[in-house]
Structure formats: C-alpha cells, structure tokens
Image (cartoon, rainbow, N blue to C red):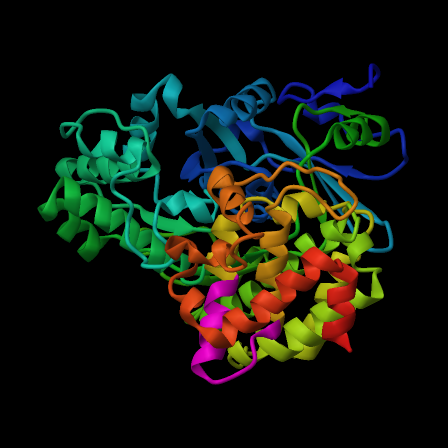
C-alpha cells in the first residue's frame, strides 16, 4: 500500500496509466474544475456512490454539461469519517464493480464536487440548498430516515431531533433532514426562487410519495401556509434503485491499493448489475439520465414492487436463515441447496410473485433466476450480517405488506411467517451452537427484549404494533409463525427448512 498514490484532483491524471494488476482504471474524462453543483444529496454512503453518482459520472464522461455535480451532505456523527475521506480526496473515490466471473470494472468517480457535514456549519448547507443552481435535492437516508411509524404511516413528531427542529424559530438552522429541506424551501420561496425537486432513492414502495407525506407532515407542524406552497409546487418523483453494494472493508482498501495503485480512504465495491427506474417528473429540470442508462417511465410502481418483494424480501429470507445455519456471506447461503429452494420456490414463487403486478418488459422467472445468480456472486462478498441489520426498518417496510396482501387474498403465508420467525430467533442473540452475534438495529433493545420472552410467550415478538400492526391477531399468520419458531428453537433452522421444502 505504501507505493499507492493518494487520490486527489492533483494526482488523478497520473492514475490508471499503469496499474499493478495490469487492469484498466478509468479516470474522469472531463475537467474536474468545470464541475458545477446542481444536486444536493443527503446520505452519501456506498450505495449512492455506486449508483446515482455513477450515472452522473457517465453523463459527464459522455460530454454532457457537468452542471449537475453533487454536493453531498452528512447529518449524523457517523458521517464525520465520510467528510474527512471525501474532503481529503476532493470528492473523488474509486468504484470497483465485479461480475460473477471475476472480471472487474474499476474507475475513479468525479461526480461529487463537494461534501458538507451539516453540524460543522448548518448555514453553509442551507446556502447551498438555496443556490438557484440547485434543482434537485436527493436522498439515500435508509428506510428509518423517514421518521414514520411503518404500521400506521404516521410521522413521528416526538423523536428528539425532530421535536427540537419543530421548536425552532423560522430562519434558525435545523439539524434534521426535514428541517433542512423545509427551511431551504422557505428561504427559496421568500427569495422568489424556483423550488427544487426532492428525489428519494431509498428502498421503499412509493419512496417519492413517502418523502412528500413526511416532509409535508413536518412542514404543517411548522407553517401551514408554507406546507400548502410545498404541496402545490414541489415535485417528489418515485423511483426504483438496484445495486448490491456491501460495506467497504479494510481488505477492499488494500485491494484498491495493491491492484490499482490508488490509496483511497473510502473506495466502494459492488456487483456489476445496475438498474434505476425513474418517474419523469422534474419541473425544475434534470440531467439527461436516459443517456446514462436510466429507465425514465410514467409509472414506477410495477418495477419497485418487483424489486422490493423479490430482491429485498429475498435478502431477508437468506439473512437470518443463513446466519442460523452458520453461513457468513450471501454467496455461501446461496450454495445451501435447502435454503436456495426455500427462497426460490416457497418465498419467491409461492408468496412474493402473487403480489407483483405485470412489469413491462420483464420476464419474472428470468428475473428471479438472475437474483439467485446475483446473490451467489462470491466476488462481491456481501455479508449476511449487513442484510440482517436494521431489520425493524426492513421487515415492516418490505415483508409485512406482502403478508397483508396475501392474507387479504386468502393466500398462504407460511414462508413469510417462517422468515419473521427466523428474525425473532436471530434477535435472541445466540445461535444454535452458542455463538453470539451483535444485533444491529435502531430498536435493538426493544426487539431483543421481546425475543427474550419466547420461553413464556411464543408470540411476544409479534406484539409490537409499530412493527407488525394487528398480525398478532391473525390466526392464519400466527399459527405457521408459532410452528416455525418452535421448530427453530427446538430443532434448528435446517430442520425447519426440511419441513417447509418437503
């Protein structure tokens, strides 16, 4: 690693000419000094940098005007590391995408022109958001970042940071996503500037609709007149995003240095698959996304339901069962014949697919086969621990709607019940051979406390109405759930899969 070149705008022109591995490293084919910020993005993580930022980098490389560069914004204490990494590298980072056959595409991405850590200087963030050049504010803040009760859909106005923002006077610098967006729009309105479009890129059904509901709920509590103006003038397009992007590891940093000669504080690794389906609703203007491979459509819902209910839910299927079976990586779980059959046949075919509408241009059988192949990409090294993290955001958002729709239609929910039971068993915190694992979840204490009651109450985990609504009262669900949890606790995950697969 000592021979690797530290990444920066000054050094990037010398990179890629001769890499240690002999592989090509693509570098920005456009003048970095010509980039002008047109998008403010909240939540600069690995996924955003492997997805939206890559599409913009493609556009800039193809010669489209580089006036849609990104200003990234971090809000949370954990974002300090990203601030330090990107600031020291002039917003540049390395993205390495790997196909199932091991072939790699490596490139330095230049779409991020600026990064602001909001707690350092909230007014600097607001100044950028009120700049008339900013026409899009985009978001990847995870499912939990929208601050709502997944069971009722209601905005949670009493969470501490939101409550503090609601108590501030107009013009005061905020601390939450909602506070920044609403205050920036207030200032733009006051200045007679056109509002920006708010673009959610999170894995939630109707992500734009949800962003609109939550931001309006916050705005109404602040200023009803301003909320009415936002509702009338601000667009919130929906979209479907897809790319498996594991958490960056020290091994990834070492690989980028050793194979490509780049000393990168925070590179990104991902699979080679990439998809973005986007509702074409941008009154303030947008980049020529379609020139970079984005599917611009009038109705995103069929695509997003396909992805959420077949990919995201299937990730939850393999996550807890895989960990209970002793696997570490997604590709290991997808080489376990029982688990693959359960995922493909019992969940995907039996319970997921009946809730997916016709998707234009998509053969669902081929799509499901492709998903298993993507999960099986050993070069991505996606961990089951990552897939099992923040389950209290994911299961209620992704799988509970599948359960409800199937129950309403009188269809079987045995597979989904088994998956929820596997989460409940995982939340006990101790595996079948006594191994312990960290339960990473914003509601960690709450879900683990519920799981600790299983000896006395098999349905204790389901009694959290915020997560499950009334499912605990639905015998068609609780019966297979209790049976699955009993088998998991008394005989183990493999025994349950053998029963279910048949």
User: Toward the viewer: 361 or 370?
Assistant: 370
Locate the C terminus and report the quarter of the image it occupies.
bottom right
Q: Which residues are magenta?
A: 399-414
Q: Is residue 98 left or right of residue 240?
A: right
Q: Is residue 290 visible?
A: no
| Residue 306 drawn at (x, y percent) | 56, 70
Q: Is residue 325 left or right of residue 486?
A: right
For image coordinates 90% across by 34% down, the residue present is: 21
Q: Main secondary structure of the magenta part?
A: helix
| Residue 86 drawn at (x, y percent) | 57, 25
Rendered view: 308 above or below 445: below
Rendered view: 323 above or below 304: above
Q: Is residue 130 visible?
A: yes
Q: Residue furthest front?
A: 456
| Residue 52 drawn at (x, y percent) | 54, 47
Q: Residue furthest left?
A: 225
Rendered view: 458 above or below 189: below
For image coordinates 54% across by 43% down, the residue present is: 448
| Residue 320 drawn at (x, y percent) | 67, 53
Q: Give the quarter of the image for residue 350.
A: bottom right
């Amino acid at each position: 690693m000592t021979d690797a070149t530290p990444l920066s705008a000054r050094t990037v022109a010398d990179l890629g000419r001769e890499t240690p591995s002999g592989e090509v490293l693509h570098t920005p084919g456009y003048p970095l000094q010509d980039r002008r910020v047109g998008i403010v993005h909240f939540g600069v993580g690995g996924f955003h940098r492997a997805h939206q930022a890559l599409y913009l980098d493609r556009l800039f490389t193809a010669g489209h005007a580089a006036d849609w560069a990104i200003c990234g914004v971090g809000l949370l204490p954990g974002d300090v590391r990203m601030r330090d990494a990107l600031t020291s590298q002039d917003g540049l980072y390395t993205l390495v995408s790997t196909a199932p056959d091991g072939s790699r595409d490596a490139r330095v991405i230049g779409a991020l022109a600026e990064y602001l850590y909001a707690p350092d200087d909230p007014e600097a963030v607001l100044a950028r958001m009120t700049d008339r050049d900013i026409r899009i504010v985009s978001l990847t803040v995870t499912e939990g970042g929208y601050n709502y009760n997944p069971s009722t859909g209601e905005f949670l106005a009493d969470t501490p940071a939101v409550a503090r923002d609601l108590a501030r006077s107009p013009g005061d610098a905020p601390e939450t996503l909602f506070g920044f967006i609403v205050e920036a729009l207030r200032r733009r309105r006051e200045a007679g500037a056109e509002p920006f479009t708010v673009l959610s890129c999170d894995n939630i059904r109707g992500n734009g609709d949800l962003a609109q509901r939550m931001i309006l709920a916050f705005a109404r509590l602040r200023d009803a007149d301003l909320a009415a103006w936002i509702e009338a003038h601000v667009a919130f397009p929906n979209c479907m995003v897809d790319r498996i992007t594991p958490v960056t590891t020290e091994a990834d940093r070492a690989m980028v240095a050793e194979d490509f000669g780049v000393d990168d504080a925070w590179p990104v690794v991902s699979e080679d698959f990439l998809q973005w389906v986007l509702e074409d609703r941008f009154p303030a203007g947008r980049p020529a996304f379609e020139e970079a491979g984005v599917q611009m459509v009038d109705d995103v819902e069929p695509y997003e339901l396909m992805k959420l209910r077949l990919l995201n839910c299937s990730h939850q299927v393999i996550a807890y069962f895989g960990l209970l079976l002793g696997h570490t990586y997604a590709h290991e779980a997808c080489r376990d014949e029982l688990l693959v059959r359960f995922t493909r046949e019992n969940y995907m075919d039996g319970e997921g697919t009946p809730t997916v509408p016709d998707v234009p241009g998509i053969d669902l059988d081929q799509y499901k086969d492709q998903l298993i192949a993507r999960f099986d990409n050993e070069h991505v090294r996606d961990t089951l621990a990552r897939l099992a993290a923040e389950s209290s955001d994911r299961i209620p958002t992704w799988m509970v709607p599948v359960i409800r729709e199937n129950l309403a239609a009188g269809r079987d929910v045995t597979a989904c019940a088994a998956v929820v039971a596997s989460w409940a068993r995982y939340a006990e915190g101790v595996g079948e051979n006594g191994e312990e694992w960290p339960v990473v979840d914003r509601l960690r204490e709450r879900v683990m406390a519920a799981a600790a009651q299983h000896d006395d109450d098999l349905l204790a985990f389901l009694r959290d109405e915020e997560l499950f609504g009334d499912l605990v009262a639905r015998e068609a669900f609780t019966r297979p759930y209790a049976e699955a949890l009993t088998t998991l606790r008394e005989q183990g995950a493999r025994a349950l899969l053998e029963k279910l697969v048949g």
